[in-house]
Amino acid sequence: MDRALLGLPTEAEYVRQYCERTGRPGIDHWEFYLAYSMFRLAAICQGVYKRSLDGNASNPEKARHYGDAVPLLARLAVELIGGHPRS
């Protein structure tokens, strides 16, 4: 995806602009916060997937696909914090 073509800032630009607007000098441990967010999203996706298995998801067909995102999100989070995910 060409972010510039779409008018979207890069991650670094977004963080810089956020810090400017909030008067912060920077965000220490930025990768930790990203990893935490990905683990949290993975947990939410797992919950949605589980509801599909239990038969109480609002959209069971769509909810089944949320489970596919869990390993990817967890792996990305581990990589962000310098870990090496298992194959």
Image (spheres, rainbow, N blue to C red):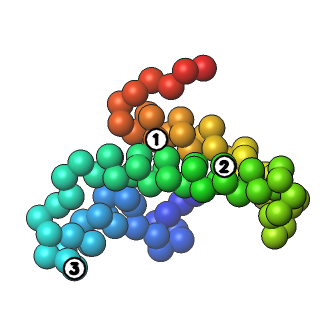
Residue 7 in the image: above or below residue 46? below
The amino acid type, in three-letter code, at marker 2 is Gln
Most foreground residue, 62 or 14: 62
Q: Which quadrant: the C terminus?
A: top right
The amino acid type, in three-letter code, at marker 3 is Arg
Most foreground residue, 83 or 6: 83
Tell me, yes or no, if residue 62 can be seen here. Answer: no
Dividing the picture into quarters, in which one does residue 19 lie?
bottom left
Residue 78 in the image: above or below residue 50? above
Measured in 3D between alpha carbons, the distance from the residue under mark 3 to the one under mark 2, in whole angstroms, is 35 Å
Measured in 3D between alpha carbons, the distance from the residue under mark 1 to the one under mark 2, in whole angstroms, is 15 Å
Q: Which residue is drawn at 45% across and 34% down?
A: 78
**Which comes sooner in the sequence, label 3 or label 2?**
3
Per the image, label 1 sits on a secondary structure element best described as: helix
Q: Position of residue 20 (x, y in %)?
A: 19, 74
Dividing the picture into quarters, in which one does residue 61 lie?
bottom right
Tell me, yes or no, if residue 6 can be seen here. Answer: yes
Q: Which residue is drawn at 40% across and 67% down?
A: 9
Q: Position of residue 5 (x, y in %)?
A: 52, 68
Measured in 3D between alpha carbons, the distance from the residue under mark 3 to the one under mark 1, in whole angstroms, is 27 Å
Residue occupying the far bottom of the picture: 21
Label 2 environment density (alpha carbons within 10 Å; few <14, some 14–19, many ≥20) = many
Residue with the mark numbered 3: 21
Left or right: 82 in relation to 57 = left
Label 3 environment density (alpha carbons within 10 Å; few <14, some 14–19, many ≥20) = few
Residue with the mark numbered 2: 46
**Which comes sooner in the sequence, label 3 or label 1?**
3
Left or right: 39 in relation to 18 = right
Residue with the mark numbered 1: 77
Q: Where is residue 29 in the image (x, y as percent from the top left)?
A: 24, 48
The amino acid type, in three-letter code, at marker 1 is Ala
Residue 64 in the image: above or below residue 25? above
